[in-house]
Amino acid sequence: MALPPDRLDRFARHIVLPEIGGAGQAALAKAKVVLIGLGGIGSPALQYLAGAGVGTLVLVDDDTVDVTNLQRQTIYGEGSVGSSKAELAAVWAHQFDELLDARAVAKRITPENAADVIAGSDLVLDGCDNFATRLAVSDACVAARVPLLSAAVGRFQGQVGAFAGHLPEQPCYRCFVGDAFDADDCDTCAEDGVLGAMAGWTGTFAALQAIRVLLAPVGGLGDPQWGKLHLLDGLAPSLRTMTIAKDSACKGCA
Ligand SMILES: [Zn+2]
């Protein structure tokens, strides 16, 4: 599938990279990514995934913009306060690149609706703020055989992990955190604070890892790094990587 000339111009700095090239850019144009949470992680992740020409973006958030979000949620401004994050994110994407298919889903993800929301996607990037949603998303991804990038941030710490729990040797997000948090609904940002730029680093790192996963079928950036959790420390600063083991008793993927 060849891209038209104006798209070749737009993505020229990608296409010149041997790791991407025309085939990689075409793969990004064909890709469908579901973004769960359009907050401190989802905002910059959306900006770089849209910038990278990811063709279809499903934008999921049931929240509205609060004035305290503006310190880190980069796609919103003062005029956004009180409006739906999912709807505003879709408007942002259309204004940024009218050829992108950006769809708003202004709903909270639950175990009941997660399968419908992620159906047919190539990747889910979860940057939401609570464990109940994260675990519902993880279980639905395993069932639908869709890879999951899970990203979280608080204070000066971020984490980004790639999960493919549907594969026999690979862990899911539930293997990592266990079952203790299914009922948890805390928003750690409200309690602990978060440096805005730290959310930006975590969100853009998640976008980089998303592009890695999407390009894996055409060679791209190599190994998709399933089961690797990257820990971003903004105070040190440093980046550490740990390996998550598959839990043979996991109720999500075993
Ligand atoms: Zn598991």
Image (cartoon, rainbow, N blue to C red):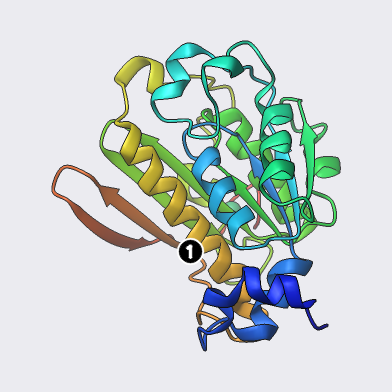
Q: Position of residue 141 (x, y in %)?
A: 71, 52
Residue 26, given in percent of the width and then of the height, sits at 73, 76
Q: Residue 33, image x and y in percent?
A: 70, 54
Q: Which quadrant would residue 179 be assigned to in this image?
A: top right
The residue sitting at 50% across, 31% down in the picture is 180
Question: Of the residues shown, which amino acid type is indicated by label 1?
Answer: Gly
Q: Does the image show residue 198?
A: yes
Q: Is residue 67 or residue 234 the one in the foreground?
A: 67
Vertical comparison of 68 with 131: above or below = above
* Residue 24 position within the rendered picture, expressed as x and y whole percent measured from the top left: 65, 79
Tell me the crowding category of disc 1: few under 14, some 14 to 19, or many 20 or more residues within 10 angstroms, Cα based. many
Q: How many marks?
A: 1
Question: Which quadrant would the N terminus be assigned to in this image?
Answer: bottom right
Residue 171, quarter of the rendered image = bottom right
Identify the residue at image location x=80%, y=76%: 4
| Residue behind mark 1 | 227
